[in-house]
Amino acid sequence: MSKASDHPVVLDGGLSNALEDRGHDLSDALWSARLLKDAPEEIAAVHRAYYEAGAMVATTASYQASVIGFERAGVSRGEAERLIASSVRIARDVRDELGGGGRLVAASVGPYGAMLADGSEYRGRYGVPASVLRDFHGPRLELLISAGPDLLAVETIPDTDEAEVLVELLAEMDFPAWFSYSIEGSSTRAGQPLEDAFAIAAIDQVVAIGINCCRPEDVQHAVETAVAVTGRPAIAYPNSGESWDATTHRWATTPTAGRDLTTLSLGWRRAGAEYIGGCCRVGPADIRAMARAIGRS
């Protein structure tokens, strides 16, 4: 097991829940990406809140942003491309406004299933050939890279089929990224062993490998596995502990965010996680507590 660095990188938390807390309805298929068009200043405000809470990374509002998705919502292709690229600019502007200070901007690359907005991002195995996934991801990666982020956040990937396509594209484009799977227990959401999944992502362009959008209690084993399999720094940013019901479009169960998530994060760091934060339902207050705890450890 590799030793964690002296200065782990604190990530931000969930974008959508922070926007909802600011009064925005994100129930349509574009989710938080809609605000790239309707209220970009609100996205900037959330990035600012996370940076000020101690996060060193702002993850852009491009997770569910795609040309296809915007076109279905009546946006022209040219405008869709501009909006996707603007997600990086918004985060960069906030970072620069705060004086930089080593802060990073990670351009979010969500799975194909996020565009479908039917819950398949939590299942994977979409039933489409690799060529469809490549045609979907390739232009979006190029667009995000051209906007000038520090790295890509390839996140919430539910299966190794999609991972193989994305890893191939990352190698071709030769741009730094982290790579994180959405998991259930000791498997990907599609049921594949984590050992196999992490090994696929271990290419030169990937700076950290791990998990996100999962239960906090699943993180420790996953981090240990990622480090053992790849020898790379691990990344971990789970949900609060609640689970998303794609049928009712509601979060269920009692959250474990706050003190419990903060305490658990210290164990993830000791196991080799060098990039630590939160995903859905984890907000600025949680990130602030996590940053303070990690800073004292």
Image (cartoon, helix red, strand yellow):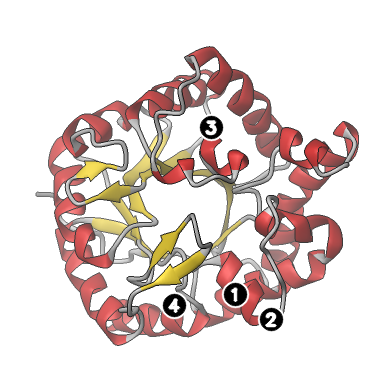
Residue at the spot of label 2:
22
Residue at the spot of label 1:
18
Whether residue 141 sits left or right of residue 35 in the image: it is left
Whether residue 194 sits left or right of residue 40 in the image: it is left
Element type at marker 4? helix
Q: Earlier in the sequence, mark 3 or mark 4?
A: 3
Residue at the spot of label 3:
175
Whether residue 144 sits left or right of residue 279 in the image: it is right
Q: Quadrant of residue 276?
A: bottom left
Answer whether labels 3 and 4 touch (C-beta < 8 Å).
no
Q: Earlier in the sequence, mark 4 or mark 2?
A: 2
Answer whether labels 1 and 2 touch (C-beta < 8 Å).
yes
Q: Name the residue type under label 2.
A: Arg
The one nearer the camera, 252 or 84, is 252
> Residue 84: horizontal and vertical position, in percent?
75, 44
Q: Nearer the viewer, mark 4 or mark 2?
A: 2
Q: Name the residue type under label 1.
A: Ala
Element type at marker 2? loop
Could you give the CA–CA distance between mark 3 and mark 1, rounded to whole angstroms?
A: 29 Å
Residue at the spot of label 4:
287
Element type at marker 1? helix
Could you give the CA–CA distance between mark 3 and mark 4, rounded to whole angstroms?
A: 27 Å
The one nearer the camera, 150 or 238, is 238
Q: Quadrant of residue 21?
A: bottom right
Q: Earlier in the sequence, mark 2 or mark 3?
A: 2
Could you give the CA–CA distance between mark 4 and mark 1, rounded to whole angstroms?
A: 12 Å
Vertical position of residue 125 compared to residue 18: above or below: above
Could you give the CA–CA distance between mark 1 and mark 2, rounded to whole angstroms?
A: 6 Å
Q: Name the residue type under label 3.
A: Phe
